[in-house]
Amino acid sequence: MREQVIESILENKIIAIVRGADEEKVPKIAQALYEGGVKLMEVTFNQKDPASFVHTQNAIRKSRELMGSKMLIGAGTVTSVALVEAAKEAGAQYIVSPDTDEDVIRRTVELDMVSLPGAYTATEAKKAHNAGADFVKLFPCIDNAPAYLKALSAPLNHIRFLAVGGVNADNCAAFMNAGAYGVGVGGYLVNKEWVAQERYDLITAEARRFVENINIK
């Protein structure tokens, strides 16, 4: 399963990040993304509200049930081993974190899930890779991020970087051309206003734009 998920990330390149949406809406978001060609979705835990963790689990579970094998569903903002295990129980297929936590990485791999920890410096990226990360999420991608990614990945060309934070349909190709293996996209794709208004058609349309633009040279 791990290799299948890795291959899907390499092939599809775009991970949509769902943050703060009601659990009943998340499967609808998944369907809208899929109709636009995005086949990877990450549902995030809200660290400020541990009581909401169960709702995140439910959202992951319901999305898996609806989408089946058509879409790969991961858990995001996973900052502890306990959350790795909670995500696994809900059916998550990969684990995304904002930081590099070696215990989180190792437990993710032990549970046969793909590991995507966050890092910003060369030291953090190397630490994550050595702990077993399958990809390293360059986060946050701010300011002149494509140039920074290119400079970072030159000496660390054995590490598969994903660009996350500040990625939109207009600049996603620049990150790919700078050496990213994929991108993670939040509000520029799963827009909170669109979700609140249940304008899933707008999510589908923006997903199509990302898919069209991601490989432009």
Image (cartoon, grey):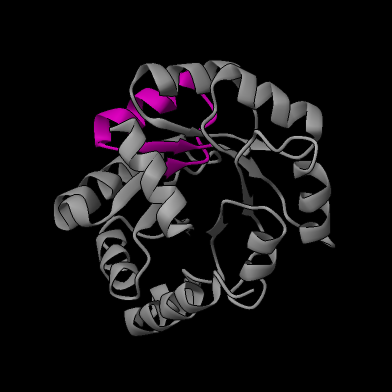
Q: Is residue 166 left or right of residue 97?
A: right
Q: In this view, does 101 lie to the left or right of 203?
A: right
Q: Where is residue 34 in the image (x, y as percent from the top left)?
A: 30, 68
Question: Is residue 52 at least partly visible in the picture?
Answer: no
Q: Is residue 94 magenta?
A: yes
Q: Residue at x 42, y 21 (%)?
A: 109
Q: Nearer the viewer, residue 133 or 65?
A: 133
Q: Residue at x 52, y 23 (%)?
A: 105
**Residue 198 versus residue 84 in the image, above or below:** below
In magenta, the rendered stretch is: 75-96
**Residue 161 versus residue 81 in the image, above or below:** below
Picture quarter containing residue 127? top right
**Residue 89 versus residue 116 in the image, above or below:** above
Q: Which of 24 and 11 is in front in this view?
A: 11
Q: Which residue is drawn at 36% across and 78% down?
A: 204
Q: Is residue 63 magenta?
A: no
User: What count of labels does the image hold?
Assistant: 0
Q: Position of residue 132 (x, y in %)?
A: 54, 21
Q: Position of residue 77 (x, y in %)?
A: 53, 40
Q: Position of residue 7 (x, y in %)?
A: 38, 44
